[in-house]
Image: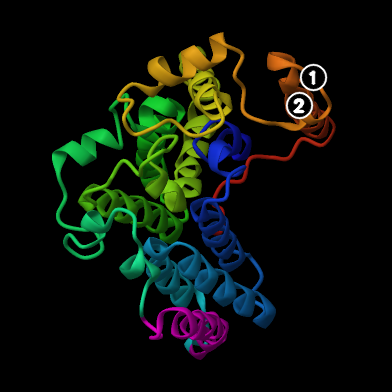
């Protein structure tokens, strides 16, 4: 599921671009991982690092504060004594202080956001609260199943998270982790559905959802754990993964920019024409003077090498499936 998240979702597109969403997602999930360690009590160094990661995720991408609040409560519940949450607050506050100093120097006030001074999309930024109004069905459909920006059209493998959540709940395992996943995903969906610019401009899929995206594959682990022996499950997973690969890589590697928001069916109107013309995004292969589609060979070699290494490790050191994890 780690490879599926990295290669078969919009995370693949944004990991190679200078957007803050993917960095924020990495900070959030790293904090969740550190807070879920089996060590008791949680080391002070890990709490300090968690605070830094949570704070940096917010100053990188403001909407991630929704997930930060959820993780803060999760961490507080796991701590004994509770006063040790002060280590998390300490480093988080240091990051916030640096952010406020920056805002004061650049914009004249510690809580003044750059969006207030942007000369682009001023109408959207001045609508509601920084473009946030109320949930709308157009946005809900748009970020889920529309061919324009639908997450489940681009990465249908993530649909398995729905039965995964049911199986997780029925198992009775790791309930706090389950609620972290459910609330984080719902919070970001709600946020995105209230934005009047929910499609995110030039984008691959719904980019505002990226901070919650690493949490979505977790329930799918329960699907493979409980149903992996069933042939129909393997067939369904293979088809969904293949579609996710074609759609995600097709959009990400086509052209020299992300698809314009004027293209309502980017896979047909952007991906296909660019691949036909061998207009591939700049990459390592081009640096090595490989032309057109051949420039993707270094990327393919790297991915195949990674898969072979994973297969070799699993084949020679099979680890038992963990029942009753500690998240």
Look at the image and say whether residue 319 sits in the magenta stretch.
no
Q: From what the image shows, is residue 93 above or below residue 252?
A: below
- Quarter of the image for residue 116 reads bottom left
Secondary structure beneath dot 2 equals: helix
Quadrant in the rendering for residue 179: bottom left
Please state which of residues 316 and 275 is positioned toward the viewer in this rendering.
Answer: 275
Rendered view: 108 above or below 10: below
Res. 200 mark: none
Label for residue 286? 2
On screen, 196 above or below 50? Answer: above
SS at mark 1 in the image: loop
Position of the N terminus by quadrant: top right
Of 149 and 241, nearer the camera is 149
Q: Position of residue 100 (x, y in %)?
A: 46, 83
Is 91 colored magenta in this rendering?
A: yes
Quick one: label 1, few (<14), some, or many (20+) residues within 10 Å?
some
Q: Position of residue 103 (x, y in %)?
A: 45, 80
Name the residue: 50% across, 79% down: 99
Q: CA distance from mark 2 to mark 1?
A: 5 Å
Q: Position of residue 286 (x, y in %)?
A: 76, 26
Q: Which residues are magenta?
A: 83-111
Callout 2 touching callout 1 (CB < 8 Å): yes
Which residue is denoted by mark 1 in the rendering? 290
Camera-nearest residue between 307 and 25? 25
Q: Residue furthest front?
A: 119
Instruction: Residue 73 in the image: state x and y as whole percent.
Output: 40, 73
């Amino acid at each position: 599921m780690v490879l599926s998240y990295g290669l078969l979702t919009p995370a693949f597109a944004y990991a190679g671009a200078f957007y803050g969403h993917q960095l924020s997602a990495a900070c959030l999930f790293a904090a969740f991982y550190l807070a879920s360690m089996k060590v008791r009590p949680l080391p002070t160094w890990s709490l300090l690092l968690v605070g830094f990661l949570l704070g940096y995720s917010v100053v990188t991408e403001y909407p991630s504060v929704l997930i930060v609040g959820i993780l803060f409560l999760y961490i507080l519940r796991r701590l004994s004594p509770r006063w040790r949450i002060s280590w998390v607050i300490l480093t988080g506050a240091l990051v916030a202080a640096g952010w406020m100093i920056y805002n004061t120097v650049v914009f004249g006030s510690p809580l003044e956001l750059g969006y207030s001074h942007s000369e682009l999309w001023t109408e959207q930024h001045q609508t509601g609260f920084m473009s946030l109004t109320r949930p709308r069905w157009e946005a809900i459909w748009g970020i889920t199943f529309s061919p324009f920006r639908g997450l489940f059209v681009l990465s249908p493998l993530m649909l398995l998270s729905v039965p995964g959540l049911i199986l997780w709940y029925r198992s009775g395992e790791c309930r706090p982790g389950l609620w972290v996943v459910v609330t984080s995903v719902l919070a970001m969906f709600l946020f995105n559905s209230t934005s009047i610019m929910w499609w995110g401009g030039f984008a691959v899929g719904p980019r505002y959802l990226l901070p919650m995206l690493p949490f979505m594959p977790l329930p799918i682990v329960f699907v493979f754990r409980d149903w992996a022996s069933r042939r129909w499950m393997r067939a369904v997973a293979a088809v969904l993964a293949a579609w996710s690969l074609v759609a995600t890589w097709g959009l990400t590697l086509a052209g020299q920019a992300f698809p314009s928001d004027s293209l309502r069916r980017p896979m047909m109107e952007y991906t296909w024409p660019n691949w036909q013309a061998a207009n591939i995004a700049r990459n390592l292969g081009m640096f090595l003077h490989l032309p057109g589609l051949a420039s993707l060979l270094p990327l393919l070699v790297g991915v195949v090498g990674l898969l072979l290494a994973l297969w070799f490790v699993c084949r020679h050191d099979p680890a038992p499936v963990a029942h009753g994890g500690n998240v």
